[in-house]
Image (cartoon, rainbow, N blue to C red):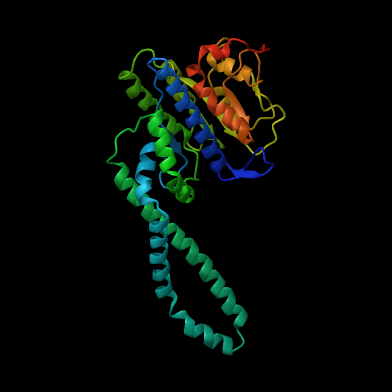
Amino acid sequence: MASSMRNDTGGQLSRLESFRQSLDNFLDEAKSLVDESRAKEMQTSIDLFSYGFGLRAMNVCDLFSLIKIGQNIITKEKIEELKQKYTDEAKRRYSGYEGLGDLAKQYGLSVLVNQFSGTVQANTETEIRRKVLLEIKSRIEKEIGNVSDTTLAIEEVAQLWKDSENAFENAEELIFGDTPMQECLTEVAKRFERELEIRDKQTTPILFILSDGEPTDGNPLPVIESLKSLGVVVISCFVTEQDIANPRVLFGQLEPQWNQGAKLMFEMSSTVVDDSAFAKFLLRKNWVIYPNSKLFVQANHSVILEEFIRVALSPFESSSDTEILPKGL
């Protein structure tokens, strides 16, 4: 998620920043929908939980719990404090080489001294970064073990997300690692089971998966099938750097030019029901929906990413907004 994604200004956003902006807009829209429903005296709520996978600090974790903890642990001040701590430690370790460097220069060995200094600096920077990451990881693991499931109403998520902006930016070095999708989905499946046991039977469970890589820990399809058996609708977005000829299209079959990660996420996605809220929302946005299409898209533009994230809200939109629709295929 560290590379770039296009936007409407013609510029580039990191995928992380693009996702953050898309989620900002999603949360604003979701909160508005809930407020409108309550103004009409309709009992409506949107509750969210979120899991992250591919974190350097840990493979899989409850993101809302992590954000809460990160607000106290992953601050600029504490990261700078750790960097300074390990920088001072490195300076003390290499201080004995300073005199030897001056002596070597007197004998015409300046090139060797410079090469050695450059190597020491590069190795030291890598070591400092590794130690900072390990200490933050240790602190996070110690705290997160004491935190239970964090499921929040949309209003709480919006506030938490707003308050977490700096912690999120400071955590950027900690969140790009492997892709343990199977492990994450296993945890998600257990979480859905726990959540659905305590919720109304009318609850619409939706899982939105956002990834830019192939799983590094095995085949997640059996876990996905168990989720679908619980009634969970699976929406998948594969983030890519490749040009997408038809970005607003839902396909009913695999395309041969897709890479393995895209093909897998297509298979994981739920099939679109023709008259569902999901289909109606996308048709209003001028998407093309082929027969037996999956709720799957490849995105390399922030607008496409944002529209597809909003698909998850479509069951909660007012039916009066969905009466006049363009035709699908």
Q: Is residue 319 left or right of residue 74?
A: right
Above-or-below relation of 261 to 198: below
The residue sitting at the right extreme is 245
Q: Nearer the viewer, residue 89 or 325?
A: 325
Quadrant, the N terminus: top right
- Residue 10: name its quadrant: top right
Q: Is residue 170 left or right of residue 281?
A: left
The residue sitting at the bottom extreme is 106
Q: What number of labels is visible?
A: 0
Q: Residue, x 45% and y 27% (percent of image)?
A: 31
Q: List x then y, in percent, for residue 103.
A: 53, 88
Q: Residue, x 44% and y 57% (percent of image)?
A: 130
Q: Residue, x 39% and y 13% (percent of image)?
A: 202
Above-or-below relation of 142 to 130: above
Q: Is residue 247 left or right of residue 166?
A: right
Q: Residue, x 42% and y 15% (percent of image)?
A: 40
> Can you see residue 306?
yes
- Residue 49: name its quadrant: top left
Q: List x then y, in percent, for residue 216.
A: 50, 38
The residue sitting at the front extreme is 39
Above-or-below relation of 119 to 299: below
Above-or-below relation of 19 to 95: above
Q: Nearer the viewer, residue 266 or 83?
A: 83
The residue sitting at the left extreme is 146
Q: List x then y, in percent, for residue 162.
A: 44, 40
Q: List x then y, in percent, for residue 212.
A: 57, 37
Quadrant, the C terminus: top right
